[in-house]
Amino acid sequence: GLHRATAVMGAAPSGGRVMVWRAEAAASTPIRGGAADVSSFLDSLADSDFIVRADDSVVSCEPAAKQGGGGGGGEGEAGRYVAAIAPLRLPGLTVRPTAFIRVDRLSDGGLRYTTERVDNAFEGSFRGLAERVTPTITAATTLRAEERCLAAEAEFELTMPLPSWWPIPAPAMDAGGALISRLVEKDTRVSLERVIGEYEARRGAAAAGGAEQQQGGGVRADE
C-alpha cells in the first residue's frame, strides 16, 4: 500500500515554532462479493464499535455517552466512542492518548471514523514541556467498497507548538516522522485485515444458515 510521511517546522501565530508530523497510508485488498454487498456490510458496522476496535492502535473503547459525551444527530453520523489508544513513543516523550471518535456513514456507501479530540497523558524527559505546549493529534480513516476490493485510506497529524529557544535536531524530526509513518501504515493494514475477516466470517455464517434452511426444507418436503 501507499504510505508517506512529512515532518515540518513552521512559525506559530502566537510566536515560537510549530512542529508538525504528518502521515498518510492507503491500502486495498481483493474481496469476494459485489460493491453493493460490501457497502451493506460497512453500513452494518456503523451501528457497532467494531470499526473502532478494528484499529490496531485502540486498546479499548466504549460509547461516548458513558463518559458524558454527545449523542448522534449529525448528517451521516452513526455513533461516538471513547477509546484508549496505544502509547505513542517519540524521542524523549511518550504520549498516552484517550481519543474521542466519531463514526460516519458516507453518501457513497463508505464509512469513516474520525478522531475529534484527544486527551493526552505524558511521560519522559520532555513531559513538562509537552504539558505546557499541549500537542494536538488528528486522525481519520475511510473505508470504501471498490470493484471487488475493499480500500482504506488513513491520515494522521501530530502538531506540537514549541518555544523558539527549544532545539530540535534534524535526526529527531526524521525519526519521529519515520516512526509515525510506520505506525499509520501498520494500523491501516491491520484494520483492513480485521474488517475483511469480519466480512468473510459473516458471509460464511450466512451461507451456512442458508444451507441449513435448504436441508430443513428438503426434510419437510420429503415428509
Image (tube, helix red, strand yellow):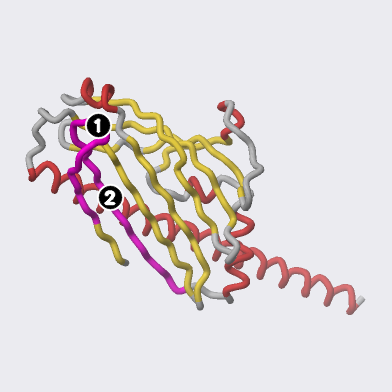
Mark 2 residue element: strand
| Residue drawn at point x = 37 percent, y = 33 percent | 97
Q: Is residue 79 magenta?
A: no
Disc 2 residue crowd, few under 14, some 14–19, many 20+, Cα 10 Å: many
Q: Position of residue 124 (x, y in %)?
A: 20, 26
- In-image side of 204 versus 188 (left or right): right
Task: Point out the stretch of residues depicted in magenta.
Answer: 5-30
Mark 1 residue element: strand
- In-image side of 106 versus 97 (left or right): right
Q: Is residue 12 magenta?
A: yes
Three-letter residue code for mark 2 = Arg
Q: On the image, which quarter does residue 40 sit in? A: bottom right
Q: Please identify, in this view, whether the residue under mark 2 or under mark 1 is nearer the observer.
A: 2
- The overriding secondary structure of the stretch rendered in magenta is strand
| Residue drawn at point x = 31 percent, y = 35 percent | 87
- In-image side of 144 versus 105 (left or right): left
| Residue drawn at point x = 7 percent, y = 39 percent | 169
Q: Looking at the image, is 69 positioned above or below residue 172?
A: above
Precedes in sequence: disc 2 or disc 1: 2
Q: Position of residue 69 (x, y in %)?
A: 57, 30
Viewer-side residue, 201 vs 159:
159
Three-letter residue code for mark 1 = Thr
For mark 2, what is the residue? 22
What is the quadrant of the N terminus in the image?
A: bottom left
For mark 1, what is the residue? 94
Q: Position of residue 193 (x, y in %)?
A: 43, 60
Is the C-beta separation of discs 2 and 1 under 8 Å? no
Q: Position of residue 115 (x, y in %)?
A: 45, 43
Q: On the image, which quarter does residue 2 sit in? A: bottom left
